[in-house]
Each structure stands twice: as C-alpha cells, then as structure tokens.
Image (cartoon, grey):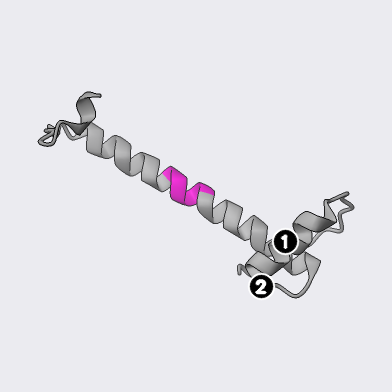
Amino acid sequence: MAVTRNRSHKHFQLDSVKIKLAQKALQTKTETETIERALDLAIAEARSHRLALAANERFLRSGIEIKDVYGALDD
C-alpha cells in the first residue's frame, strides 16, 4: 500500500455490505484500510491499462504483419 502523505476528512454514504465484502477480499482490518487499498488498486489498474494500451499502439505502429495461421481471426 502506498504511503499516505495528505489525508482529508471526508463523509460518504457507502454500502456497508460492499465494504464488508471488500474487507474480506482485500484481507483488511478496518474500513479505512479497505477503502485506501481499493483506491490503490484502482490507481494501479488504471496505470497498467494505460501502459498496455501504449505498448499495443507501439506494436501496431511498428508495421508488423500478423498472419492467422489457424484461420481463427476470419470469423
């Protein structure tokens, strides 16, 4: 989990069942830890998605020719 430097006090109305399910999935002890971990995961996922998209675009721009030797892409 990333080190939190700036904290702000917020008030949210959240679904308690979702928080409990997230706590179980993330194996966290507190609701705050659960939300912080979920935010960290969302940020990491967005970064990963951006990097994968950029790599895919570079691959496509490289001019490589893709051959469908199994005929699976013709559908």
Crowdedness near tag 1: few (<14), some (14–19) or many (≥20) residues, C-alpha within 10 Å: few
Which of the 4 quarters of the picture holds residue 29? bottom right
Say whether residue 5 is visible: no
* Left or right: 60 in relation to 28: left
The image shows residue 5, relative to residue 15, as above or below, that is below
The numbered mark at residue 27 is 2
Q: Is residue 58 visible?
A: yes
Q: Which mark is residue 21?
A: 1
> What range is drawn magenta here?
46-50
Say whether residue 54 is magenta. no
Q: What residue is shown at x 53% (from left), y 55% (from top)?
A: 44
Task: Please give the name of the residue rendered at 13% of the width and 36% of the height, measured from the top-left corner.
Answer: 70
Say which of 69 and 12 sits in front: 69
Q: Alpha carbon of mark 1 to alpha carbon of mark 2: how far?
A: 10 Å
Give above or below for 44 relative to 28.
Answer: above
What SS does tag 1 mark? helix
